Amino acid sequence: MNPRFLKYLAAACLMIPLSAHGEDFAPDASRIVSDPTYLPLQGQIFGSTDYQWRTTTQDVFNAAGTLTKSQRLDSNPLSQAFEYGVTDDFSLRFNMGYDPSATTKTTLADGTTSSRINLGWTDPNFGFTYRVLDQRSNPVSFDLRGSYSPDVFGAKSATVTQDGSVALGAQSFDLGASLGRETRFFTIAGMFDALNVGHRSIENPLNGANVDINSLWTYSLRIATQTRLTDRFSFNAGAGYTLGHDADLFNEASDTAYASHVGATANLNAALNYQFVPNIVVGSLEFQHNFSGGRNNIYAVMPASDWQIHNQSGDVLGVRLRYVLQ
């Protein structure tokens, strides 16, 4: 996926407010709930309750390039987040999620089908945001962000007879930064994140053996915009790009090591927001389409065991309720 499409999307997003509200682009430092640059003020508690329906389709090929199976992955994650404004420029947040049914349906080349289900809690996540520059006294806002997620729930793979978990099976931490500019009718922000996922161990419930994955870093860039159509309605549009990465894996059951190259992924996203109670309660309908670079798994000592994932894409439909407790 060529990352230049992010530049084109940003230009397109800018054209929306230029045509609709060209008369007013004076800076505005209001803290608008659902805006990409939103940060709670001192003493405020911000909450976000989310439900998503996610679906991904992909094809799996063997070392000879022959299609061996096709898969569809459907999940229904719920998540809850809270953020507290310690000061106007510093906040603490917590979020956690639960998925009652993440189903992988596999169709083999001969037409045989099977399903596997993962469910359960995600690991909790603790984070902070520090506003280094505030647009109230600067041309832009600039935030530094960080978060940490401990390895609370063990990771277990699913089989056709036993459910697996949705937990990561490792601790992780994220370091990020956001740069944004808000006007009366329009906001644009750019974000960067560096995510470290620690050593992972995923248990196979059939034999108790683990698949171990080495610690790794992933890096992502995002562009987010909001166009305020009226005092109540607003429209968000954005894009994201995550660089590809490599991982080393070891299957204890087969005593086999292999390498996995995960291709870069990109997404386009949009949301329609409505302020039920102005700047207190905001509801959103969200959509995102994911473009994936696939995955190659390489066995150095057994090249005939290599396999790849291609033709992978996914969609996310979501409903979100944001609210502020004074």
Image: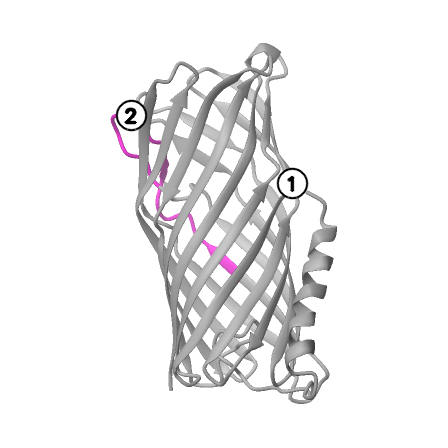
The alpha-carbon separation of the residues under discs 2 and 1 comes to 30 Å
Name above or below for residue 153 compared with residue 176: above
* Left or right: 317 in relation to 290: left
Q: Which of these two is toward me, 68 or 307?
A: 68
Predominant SS along the magenta part: loop
- Mark number displayed over residue 244: 1
Could you tell me which residue is drawn at 53 percent across and 71 percent down?
235
Report x, y in % for residue 219: 64, 50
Q: Is residue 37 visible?
A: no
Residue annotated with mark 2: 160
Quadrant of image for the N terminus? top right
> Could you tell whether 97 is left or right of 10 in the image?
left
Is residue 191 shown above or below 100?
below
State the residue lying farthest toward the left. 161
Vertical placement of residue 258 versus 292, above or below: above
x then y, percent, for residue 54: 41, 47
Q: Amino acid at mark 2?
A: Val
Asked whether 193 or 27 is in front, the reply is 27
Q: Please report the residue visible at 32 percent of the width from the left and 52 percent of the height from the top.
A: 98
**102 left or right of 172?**
left
**Mark 2: few, some, or many residues within 10 Å (few <14, many ≥20)?**
few
Residue 175 found in image quarter: bottom right
Q: Position of residue 74 (x, y in %)?
A: 38, 41
Report the amino acid beneath label 1.
Gly
Which contiguous range is marked in magenta? 147-165
Which image quadrant: the C terminus? bottom left
User: What residue do we see at 69% from left, 88% from top?
Assistant: 23
Whichever of callouts 2 and 1 sits on the residue coming sooner in the sequence is 2
